[in-house]
Amino acid sequence: MNKYELALVVSAKLDDEARAAVVEKAKGYITRYEGVIGAIENWGKKKLAYEIQKQPEGYYYFIHFEAEPACAPALEKEMRILDGTLRYLIVRSDEEVEVTEEAPAEEAPAEAPAAEEPAPEAVSEEAAETEQETPAE
């Protein structure tokens, strides 16, 4: 069995019960195709990068599951016609994912490590060397 992750963006226009029903339906499709559901992450309401069906926001859910390779294409067919979903994506995951059932706290985006800058005196020495090497007219 392979490990998969289903990323699901549900319409923000739906009420809580309808959103829960969409997620339950997606879980039902996974179990219908003999998948084993692991953790479910609820990331809550987020602003979309661009409007989808004239909606600027959506609720994000990530469902981790294990299934046979034939499950992914069959699940994709079901997700394509599921009402209430704005977008979905099924990806194969090779790593173990430890997830709690709680929504993650808002975190600042991870900063890329800064490139080491040369010391100020090293810069001035390099500049002095290039000035000396340049012939004067």
Image (spheres, helix red, strand yellow):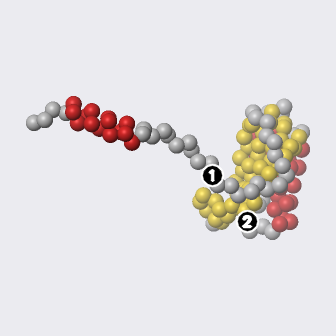
Q: Which of 37 and 120 lies nearest the eye of the viewer?
A: 120
Judged from the image, the secondary structure of the residue bearing numbered disc 1 is: loop
Mark in front: 1 vs 2: 1
**Residue at x 56%, y 42% (from the top left corner):** 113
Image mark for residue 12: 2
Question: Residue 64 is drawn in which quadrant?
Answer: top right
Q: Which of 76 and 127 lies nearest the eye of the viewer?
A: 127
**107 to the left or right of 15:** left
Q: Residues within 10 Å of mark 2 (few under 14, many from 20)?
A: many
**Residue at x 74%, y 57% (from the top left corner):** 105
Position of the C terminus, as image quadrant, is top left
Q: CA distance from mark 1 to mark 2?
A: 24 Å
The number of callouts visible is 2
**Residue at x 32%, y 40% (from the top left corner):** 124
85, above or below 3, in the image: below
Q: Residues within 10 Å of mark 1 (few under 14, many from 20)?
A: few
Q: Amino acid at mark 2?
A: Ala
Q: Which residue is mark 1?
A: 109
- Residue 75, position as x, y percentages in the image: 80, 44
67, above or below 16, in the image: above
Q: Is residue 78 visible?
A: no
Image marks 1 and 2: residues in contact by CB distance under 8 Å: no
- Residue 8, position as x, y percentages in the image: 75, 52
Q: Is residue 40 visible?
A: yes
